[in-house]
Amino acid sequence: MRDQEPGPAGRRLTTQEAAELLGVKPETVYAYVSRGHLSSRRVPGGRGSTFDAQEVESLARRNKRESTGTSGSGGELSVRTRLTFIDTDRYCFRGVDATELAARHSYEEVAEWLWTGRLRPGVTFSAPGPAVAAARRAVAALPAHADPTDRLRVAAIAAATADPLRFDLSEESVLGTARILIPTLVAALTPTGFTYRDEGSLAERLWSGLSRRTADEATVRVLDTALALLVDHDLAASTLAVRVAASARAHAYAAVSTGLAVLEGPLHGAASGLAHKLIAEVLDRGDAGPVIAEELRAGRRIPGLGHRLYAGEDPRARVLFGLLEEIPRCAPALAAARDIVATAARHTPLHANVDLALAVFTASCAMPATAGETIFAVARTAGWIAHALEEYGERPLRMRPSGHYTGPKPPQPLPE
């Protein structure tokens, strides 16, 4: 039965009714809430929530338009891709389970699979001296308060200036760029005064830019697995921006710079940092209850919970939590994460996502709150290159939607 309420709020729907109207599971309704697509209101004296019927119906219409690849202005909303497939609670790279790939292969091997559909066992990426030198000089000129995404974006631009072949968009050349650019970005993160050594796995080299602690085999394995899991995830906002740039035939360095610019938005790349701070606060206070209460009182969503593409637990989080459980130093942060999930579940039954798993890792390894975003950016660079390669094979400038004009009807008189 629908919960009828008088006044401007209008008709209210139960969780089950909202789920039926949207054609999803009840858990997905709460995922929409966590991502800001829906607002909810608690049932007085009960544990359930209600939803504004008009808001739910609007979301249902929008979902229908997106699923059919049409919009009111006739623009194309779907993009053909052979890279990542997401279904229910799993995702695949070129048809192969991504979590199994990440568990068995290094980040570099998974990147090669995404780019070419071929595995290259033991492959490592290395950067030429001129590219590293140009990137590190440019990054060293930034103010001390520049965050890692700033450094990565500047490093990508600097590395481009050192590559005279950057405008060659052939597959072979772009893959060569990718294998150079990713380790160059990692080199640019190495603190000033430290010597960058272009040897070992990419995860081993990245570690020195994230933590002053000495790495061990278990923690490097978590970092390498996280990089492999985060290589690609369909058309996230930054990936779509990369494809738009590639559609205009921007070179690979410029396309990656575009992705980094969008990643810095607070609704995209900042989630892991917010989850890190949440974990740190729960560890400091010893209880998630008051921390969650303050977040909700301030009208903020709980970071690290829920994902619009997964009704259950984010498969990337599941893999990382399994590895983190094997590391004793991660036990306190893991307990804090479980406390956050259990406490928030009394308000909104959402599962942990990859941002919460990254936060447990970064908080346990004495890394700054920005480390999760850094890991995400380095990892996703490989995915952005893969999408750029696909887009270079499509018609130029096809990512050009038509605007739906809603201003004053022309002709209007000239302004006085």
Image: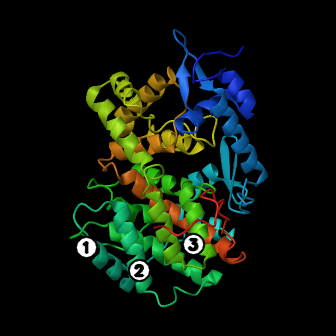
- Nearest to viewer (mark 3 / mark 1): 3
Is 203 situated left or right of 214 in this image? Answer: right
* Quadrant of res 360: top left
Q: Is residue 71 above or below residue 359?
A: below
Q: Which residue is mark 2?
A: 159
Q: Is residue 186 above or below residue 319?
A: below
- Asked if the residues shown at circle 2 and circle 1 are in contact, with their CB atoms under 8 angstroms apart, the answer is no
Q: Quadrant of the N terminus?
A: top right
Horizontal and vertical percent for residue 63?
A: 71, 43
Report the disc number at residue 245: 3
Label 1 sits on a secondary structure element that is helix
Report the disc number at residue 140: 1
* Quadrant of res 3: top right
Tell me how far mark 2 sits from mark 3, CA to CA: 18 Å
Q: Residue at x 51, y 85 (%)?
A: 166
Horizontal and vertical percent for residue 53?
A: 66, 27
- The front one of 34 and 52 is 52
Number of numbered discs visible in the structure rendering: 3
Label 3 sits on a secondary structure element that is helix
Is 235 situated left or right of 108 in this image? Answer: right
- Nearest to viewer (mark 2 / mark 3): 3
